[in-house]
């Protein structure tokens, strides 16, 4: 079965650091379990249990002798926070991850196929601007998509 985290959702984080996970993204979770971690471009990644296991395998294949690989593994593993979606559909975003992503009250939750991402709205707008005005075609060509 292939997971497919998709969509873009505007949500808020409450005073206790809790976020309601969009139902479309919640549908992709194996068993209401998630792993949150620091991710690229300053966002928080949200992994299902299965997605996290896949990421762990990928990280372990990077090679322990490569200093850059060790740095990536340390950053991702050290920031990992395991949680479960509660009965109200919420997860808790730890303060260290909120600080990393510049997340305060308003957030954008996006799907990225094999995981979800939680963004500061201004950072998401900057990320989105990379593909505005025809830039998507240019990026796809560069990647041989």
Image (cartoon, rainbow, N blue to C red):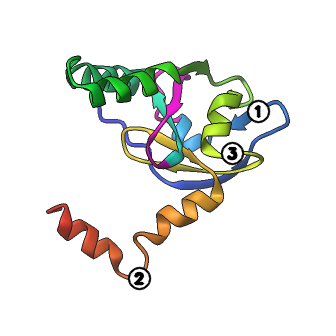
Distance in Å between CA atoms under marks 1 and 3: 10 Å
Helix or strand or loop: what does disc 3 sit on? Answer: loop
Q: Quadrant of residue 98?
A: top right
Which segment is the magenta one? 27-41
Q: Residues within 10 Å of mark 2 (few under 14, many from 20)?
A: few
Direction left: furthest residue: 144
Q: Does 72 sit left or right of 109 as displayed?
A: left
Closer to the N terminus: mark 1 or mark 2?
1
Image coords of residue 120 (percent x, y) = 64, 52
Q: Residue at x 34, y 76 (%)?
A: 135
- Between residue 75 and residue 141, name the one nearer to us: 75
Q: Is residue 45 above or below residue 91?
A: below
Distance in Å between CA atoms under marks 1 and 2: 35 Å
Helix or strand or loop: what does disc 1 sit on? Answer: loop
Distance in Å between CA atoms under marks 3 and 2: 27 Å
Image quarter hosting the C terminus: bottom left
Question: Any magenta on residue 28?
Answer: yes
Image coords of residue 21 (percent x, y) = 63, 38
Mark seen at residue 133: 2
- Between residue 111 and residue 30, name the one nearer to us: 111
Q: Which residue is mark 1?
A: 17
């Amino acid at each position: 079965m292939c997971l497919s985290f998709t969509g873009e959702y505007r949500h808020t984080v409450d005073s206790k650091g809790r976020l309601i996970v969009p139902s479309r993204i919640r549908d992709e979770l194996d068993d209401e379990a998630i792993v949150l971690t620091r991710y690229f471009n300053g966002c928080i990644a949200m992994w299902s249990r299965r997605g996290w296991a896949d990421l762990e395998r990928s990280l372990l294949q990077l090679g322990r002798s490569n200093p850059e690989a060790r740095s990536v593994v340390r950053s991702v593993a050290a920031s990992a926070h395991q949680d479960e979606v509660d009965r109200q559909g919420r997860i808790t975003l730890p303060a260290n991850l909120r600080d990393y992503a510049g997340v305060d009250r308003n957030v954008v939750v996006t799907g990225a196929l094999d995981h979800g991402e939680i963004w500061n709205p201004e950072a998401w707008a900057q990320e989105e601007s990379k593909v505005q005005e025809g830039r998507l075609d240019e990026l796809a060509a560069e990647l041989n998509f």
